[in-house]
Amino acid sequence: MRILFLSTRHNGLSQRAQVELEDLGHHVDVAEVSDGAQMEAAANRFRPDLILAPMLKSAIPAEVWQRHLCLIVHPGIPGDRGPSSLDWALLEDAPQWGVTVLEARDELDGGPIWAHREFPMRGTSKGAIYRRETTDAAMLAIRDALQRFSVGATPPFVSDAATPMGRERMPCRQDDRRIGWDAPLDDLLRHIRSADSAPGLQLTLAGVKVRVYGAYPEARLRGRPGELLAQRDGALCVACGDAALWISHLRRRQGLHTDDPRYDIKLPAAQVLSDRLQDVAEHSLPPESRPTALTWQPIRYRERGYNGYLHFDLLNGAMSTPVLERLLAAYRYARKRSTRTLVLCGGEDVWSNGIDLNAIEAAADPAQESWHNILAINALVREIVQTDDKRTVSLIQGNAGAGGVILALAADRVYAREGAVLNPHYRGMGGLYGSEYWTYLLPRRVGAVVARQLTESLQPLGTARAQRIGLLDGRFDNALSGESLIEYIETELAAGNKLGPWRTALAEKAQQRLSDEQQKPFEAYAVEELAEMRRNFFGPDPAYHLARRAFVRKQEVAIEVAAAMQA
């Protein structure tokens, strides 16, 4: 079928739908739209067999849905209506939630239901639930709906008595989430997570009104509710009614000066409140330590048998210069250990999206910080590629983009979760050239022709195609996580960790690296890439800076700049 996507933003869910439907043989056109006129123009231009709205914040006009079947992907259970479905589900501690595919009608979220799927809720943020459970359920429901449409069926859904029906809900506002630091830990976590990643829960901290993101329980520290107890790697530990919790990021309406708008974006909590932390102690925690109680440890290293596991769980996968410096130090520590294989695990919901555009936007000199950030990620990639005494493995559990994809390719072998979406390109960010040795790492995996296609088409890549073209060595099931995932990778690596095969693998790696070096010195790739990046950062064309600013501040200009660069 010829399917038109109408999306406010081509986000992770809509990208996942695109790559999976294309794998099924459908032709997918994507239109990012903000109003009815744009939707009508897109429908007239593409003449689809069916319209799908994976992520749409505006109603489809009657002029469109009366002429085309329009299926809306709604992140709620049958009967649920309104724009804040997941917010309310988390706020009210719903044990189960779901996704409904329904037909567009005048009544918002009130059309005939073509399919629905449910899932158990997980104790995490709204953004994480959306990226994993909601997206997985949406794909199953979309496939069900398209199958019914393809055979000429009508909307079949009749509510099952065992399925709780939703109801129409108003948008979830800050007043609906209102809570104080004197509340119990579980209540605070629920409120913060219901607003994370947007719009953030509004609270007062150290006398400053802020929006709060990235909350994690702390089992040992205690204090007066609202008291700042400690700081660690940019996060702040705050006392609450019966315990404490770590806050990784804050958003402050104004910065240290009332005319400074740089801080009106998500940034590390300690950076946002840097003028209030004179008496707040740093509680550092080396990545190799094993805390005896629950705490926040975004970069951590563990060993099991012959394998070392380096985890880095970062908000939205953004890797700032300080984060990369800490991660490089942890990697160098892991290299010194007597393991045979080093596994880079990333986070459960996002692997990496490369350099931290928010941190760059907030810097006094964004061009200079862009430069520092790209040098820091290059240093990590170089260290991984030049690891000659261990096998290295990247374990991609969530979506990855730009330099984050290339970072994964620095390892000897790369595995990804079924359904992860990869975006191995940079140009959409104002023509950014990219570095991380991508001109070496990407072609050695997929060849020069495919590498060019991937970096210039600006299209998302699904794991099935990624494995077919050689970008991935393997995929693992969605259901695997935590210990079950570790057991899977242990089995995958077991044969190669035997002494004979392991020595052979290292010898072959050394020989391949020598051959590659003779063809072209490894550092030559970085020199060429950084020459292009210097022009992006410091040259007369401001396209990268305009696109970054628009992206960080959620301005529509980001779409316009990306479209201009494609043209």
Image: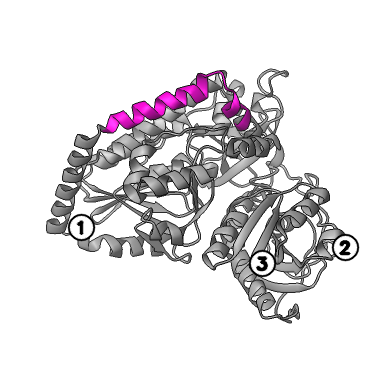
Residue 560 is situated, as x and y percent measured from the top left of the image, at 67, 37
Q: Quadrant of residue 139?
A: bottom right
Numbered mark located on residue 497 in the image: 1
Local secondary structure at mark 2: loop
Q: Magenta segment: does it hold 170?
A: no
Local secondary structure at mark 3: strand
Q: Main secondary structure of the magenta part?
A: helix
Q: Is residue 394 left or right of residue 313?
A: left
Mark toward the start of the polypeptide (2 vs 3): 3
Numbered mark located on residue 106 in the image: 2
Residue 249 is situated, as x and y percent measured from the top left of the image, at 59, 37
Above/below status of 43 relative to 434: below
In the image, 500 versus 200, the foreground residue is 500
Q: Residues within 10 Å of mark 1 (few under 14, many from 20)?
A: many
Say which amino acid is labelled 1: Asn
The residue located at (40%, 65%) in the rendering is 484
Numbered mark located on residue 523 in the image: none
Residue 31 visible in the snapshot: yes
In the image, 500 versus 243, the foreground residue is 500
Say which amino acid is labelled 3: Gly
Spatial CA distance of label 3 from label 1 is 42 Å
Residue 424 visible in the snapshot: no
Numbered mark located on residue 98 in the image: 3
Spatial CA distance of label 2 from label 3 is 23 Å
Contact (Cβ within 8 Å) of mark 3 with mark 1: no
Q: Quadrant of residue 210?
A: top right
Above/below status of 239 relative to 541: below
